[in-house]
Amino acid sequence: MDIIKIAIDSLKDELEATIIYGRLARMYRHKPISKKLIKIAEMESRHVRFWSDFLRRRGCDPSRIKPSRLKITIYTFIFKIIGLGLTLKLLEASESSAIEVYTKLLESPDLSSDEKSELYNILEDELVHEDEFIDEESKFKDFMNHVRDAVLGMSDGLVEVLSVSAGLAGAYGNPFNVALGGLIVGIAGALSMGIGSFTSVRAQKQVRLGVLSRIFLASRYIPKLFRDRIFNYMRRKGFSDKTSETIADEALKNRELLGKIIAEEEYGLKEEALENPAKAGLYTGTFYIIGALVPLIPYFLLLPVQLSIPLSFILAAIMLGITGFLIAVSAGLSIKWKMLELICAGLGSAMLTYGIGRIASISLGIEVE
């Protein structure tokens, strides 16, 4: 383990985080969140001092380590585009990586006991960051849920219409015909996706509400039926018999709590987690058609097909990358791999369809103008 390299990377990350959190705090100067952001920026400053001293003790000059202005500018730009909720999710991903590195570093014999003690404090600070994020992100819960509906709808619209337009372009040479055909497919797909999402979420919600209703009725009239189940759930979680009995007896006194525990433990259901069918359908359908229009832009501009095809692919790749970024940030996935996955899958599907269109063109004797 190269602790010097880890220290240099950590110092650089902490310098960047200090500046980013400070900028966010200034942007929200007159709002309660500003105090939390200032608190985190001050924590990051303490971490900067630790890593600077850490490097000095090992003969390295920390003043030579500079934060990446490009990274800070990108984060600031991203914040202005996607807002605080998703920006905090993005910063949380960086904090999680730091926690993993610090945990491994604590096992190194090259650190003194004082350094390990201070690193424990830093690790605690990083975990506090996550608590702050969880508290703040809960305010964006509804938004975050619908961001996923939106980006998934957009992704489907992009891939399907890009594939169709590429296939049509491979068979016909008139850009207007390609644009019109792609638009028809896009509108039909948006209606299908929107209605399908509404119907699916509504049916799922009805089923889950039915289960919850039966659980709460049973907990009201025959609560003792659930008491032993809760006792067994707690034991399986590792609680002692005495603690499990205490939890079960307390739940028995509160019928609503009793029903919630059974719903969550036995069925994995939470009433507050049920999605709104109308919003799900609206977001999915609306963003599907937005995604569908992107690869059709060159054809609507009536550019030659030979130029429209590569431009369509480039625009689609950009939007697929953005969609992958949003999905990765909102779901806590690897940004790089999610973006690559969507771009490769979307463009691969479109290229295959274009190839089929060209085969059809040659087989049917239709020449591209």
Image (cartoon, rainbow, N blue to C red):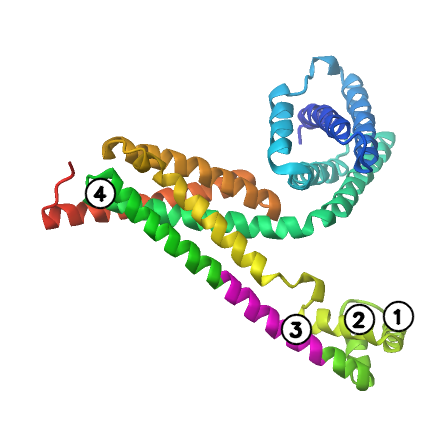
The kind of secondary structure element at disc 3 is helix
Mark 1 and mark 2 in contact (Cβ < 8 Å)? yes
Q: Amino acid at mark 1?
A: Thr
Report x, y in % for residue 361.
Answer: 15, 46
Q: Amino acid at mark 2?
A: Met
Quick one: 34 or 301, which is closer to the camera? 301
Residue sitting at x 43%, y 54%: 190
Q: Nearer the viewer, mark 2 or mark 3?
A: 3
N-terminal of the pair, mark 4 or mark 3, is 4
Residue sitting at x 45%, y 58%: 193
The kind of secondary structure element at disc 1 is helix
Determine whether 158 is above or below 117 in the image.
below
Mark 3 and mark 1 in contact (Cβ < 8 Å)? no
Determine whether 65 is above or below 29 in the image.
above
Q: Which residue is mark 2?
A: 234
Residue sitting at x 49%, y 50%: 286
Distance between the alpha carbons at the discs numbered 4 and 1: 69 Å
Residue sitting at x 38%, y 33%: 314
Mark 4 neighbour density, 10 Å: few (under 14) some (14–19) many (20 or more): many
Distance between the alpha carbons at the discs numbered 2 and 4: 62 Å
Q: Amino acid at mark 4?
A: Gly
Q: Nearer the viewer, mark 2 or mark 4?
A: 4
The kind of secondary structure element at disc 2 is helix
Q: Which residue is mark 3?
A: 209
N-terminal of the pair, mark 2 or mark 4, is 4
Residues shaded magenta: 197-214
Q: Which residue is mark 1?
A: 243
Report x, y in % for residue 146.
Answer: 59, 51
Q: Main secondary structure of the magenta part?
A: helix
Q: Which residue is mark 4?
A: 170
Report x, y in % for residue 233.
Answer: 76, 73
